[in-house]
Image (spheres, grey):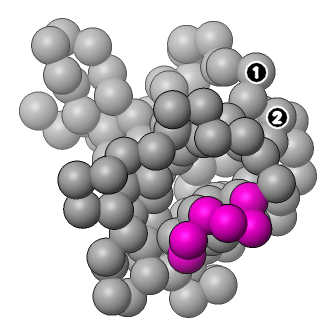
Amino acid sequence: MLTSVQSVDPVLSELVRALRNRGLRADVQVLTLCGDPDVRLVACQDRADVVVELLAELPEESPAEHWHAVRVDGQDRQVWRGPRRDAPTDQVVRFVAELTYDGAMVPYPRIG
């Protein structure tokens, strides 16, 4: 079940615009899974062989201290802890963009 994208944090819309300006495909997905909201900013390059899912929440939920992202490359899924939630937009955009490549230049820890 899809929920309105208007109900997500405006920061996600800003991140989508910034990622698109860098030439990436980006969009916000809001689904209900097992009765709970699942909010993700999904980004990839044109070839879409690697997808990055930046995990988020609805505005009424308490945000995590850091952004977390899942890098999906075929069957391989890697979880990364990114910048703090209050980091500048360009820092979060660099984090997501680097993960769409090989992740080797990401200055944040892989946690799973």
Could you say where residue 55 lies in the image, as x and y percent from the top left?
50, 37
Could you say where residue 33 lies in the image, as x and y percent from the top left?
18, 22
Q: For residue 36, what is the image quadrant?
A: top left
> Which region shows up in magenta?
101-106
Residue under circle 1? 65
**Which residue occupies the foreground of this view, 19 or 10?**
19
Residue under circle 2? 84
Residue positioned 55% across, 75% down in the render: 101
Within the magenta stretch, is there residue 16? no
**Which residue type does callout 1 highlight?**
Glu
Dot placed on the residue nearer the N-terminal end, 2 or 1: 1
Does 27 sit above or below residue 10?
below
Within the magenta stretch, is there residue 103? yes
Q: CA distance from mark 2 to mark 1?
A: 6 Å
Q: For residue 72, what is the image quadrant?
A: bottom left
**Which residue type does callout 2 highlight?**
Arg
The answer to whether marks 2 and 1 mark residues whose Cβ atoms lie closer than 8 Å is: yes
- The secondary structure type at the circle numbered 1 is loop
Residue positioned 40% across, 35% down in the render: 39
The quadrant the N terminus occupies is top left
**Which residue occupies the foreground of this view, 20 or 71?**
71
Residue positioned 61% across, 64% down in the render: 103
